[in-house]
Image (spheres, rainbow, N blue to C red):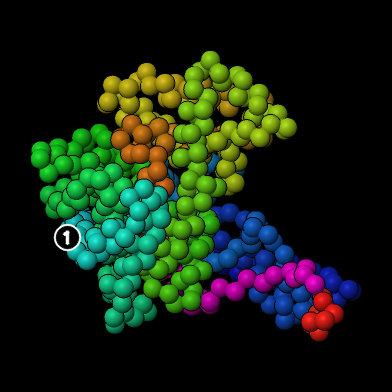
Amino acid sequence: MSTQQRTATLTIDGKTVEFPVMVGTHGNDVIDIRTLGGKTGLFTYDSGFLSTASCQSHITFIDGDKGELLYRGYPIEQLAEKCSFLEVAYLLRNGELPNKQQKEHFEDVIRHHTLVHDQLTRFYNGFRRDAHPMAVIVGVVGALSAFYHQGFDYSDVEMRDVCFNRIIAKLPTIVALAYRYNTGLPFMYPRNDLDYTSNFMYQMFGVPCEEYKPNPVLSRALDIIFTLHADHEQNASTSTVRLAGSSGANPFACVAAGIACLWGPAHGGANEACLKMLEEIGDVAHVGEYIARAKDKSDSFKLMGFGHRVYKNFDPRAKLMGKVCADVLAELGLENDRLFKLAKALEKIALEDDYFIEKKLYPNVDFYSGIVQKALGIPTAMFTCIFALARTAGWLAQWEEMLTDPEYKIGRPRQLYVGPARRDVPELAKR
């Protein structure tokens, strides 16, 4: 980031004030309005923060018009092809990809911190058996702060290192335990001989009475899914983590807040909604009918998995997810899967139909991820938990970046008050 000599001029009631223009590596330039209140007595109004930069960040960049996603400058396509999720997690936090020695050390540290405190496993028994797994992991992740709460100075890089490693290592175990509890299966302890993603699948699907052998194709597919969801700029859940962290809250509470935000159907729950939509359509023969409904403004039906608030071109993650989907279904002998055929038919229309082209409604990452996860045996209610597991790497990187920013302040958005004017409370007899 650099500040050029360029300025923006604002004229209010005949008075002219100037603000510097800040220039980043990529993307839109930004008008620095931090002195606006002091100079004019006014604030800006930007509902949903559509035109407001809340921070400076080195981590992730999205070009929605080009359909480009970069982690620390690296294209998501290259990272998904050449790196594991743990390498990407290391990159997000440290700014550079690990060398061979750093990679081996980081993987070893994570592998040996996957166990959770035995008392933490008893928390699961306090939830209803049919509780939504997202409700469970919000509570359990937040509860980690009750186990690791003494002597942590988050201004110390070594303390942040411990917290990052601890949470990244334990999230797969916490998520898998939520699934096992929900299904009545016995808890499976992690295995140190397995890689990160295979270990998670073992804890999800292994049973004590027989040996579990990870399928490398399926493990690699899920690892790519983790990479595609690891970070995504200043989205709602990331902004929630940053805002919570700005108060000095511990990282376990901040991540729990991010999980709670991610649970919303407009955010992390979109892939679940997309799969339900495909089930509703049912068959390729019904595609035309539902496309017509999607175009009809008087019809409440919405075509889920198309369009994105940021991407005005093809979501690059969707292209990768489509390939992953094909690989998984081929490995499992499900090439003729009904939902996959249906998804391909919908995608073809979206890329050729003038209505979708004009409105730039291209398939997004959620469009295929639900099909992939279902094929892997992951139930629909767990989809957002998988998202949370992956996004934790980005959340923690963003949390640490915020804490180490010399301009860091506690978040305090302004408002435009439109309620009643000041008034006096009348006597009871006159109410």
- Residue 88 seen from this side: no
Judge whether residue 108 can be spotted in this image: yes
Q: Secondary structure at mark 1?
A: loop
- Name of the residue lying farthest toward the top: 285
Write the residue at 41% across / 55% down: 135
**Does the magenta run of residues contain 128?**
no
Is 414 magenta? The answer is yes
Residue stretch in magenta: 401-420
Q: Which residue is mark 1?
A: 112
Location of residue 417 in the rendering, given as x and y in whole percent from the top left corner: 75, 71
Rendered location of residue 204, percent (x, y): 25, 44
In percent of width and height, residue 63 lies at 55, 47
Count of picture labels: 1
Q: Residues within 10 Å of mark 1 (few under 14, many from 20)?
A: some
218 to the left or right of 372: left
Which image quarter is the N terminus in?
A: bottom right
Q: Amino acid at mark 1?
A: His
Q: Is residue 261 above or below residue 331?
A: below
Q: Nearer the viewer, residue 93 or 381?
A: 381
Q: Farthest residue to the front: give it.
A: 429
- Above or below, 341 relative to 131: above
**Residue 187 in the figure: left or right of residue 56:** left
Q: Quadrant of the C terminus?
A: bottom right
Rendered image quadrant of residue 249:
bottom left
> Which of the two residues, 94 or 350, is positioned nearer the viewer here?
350
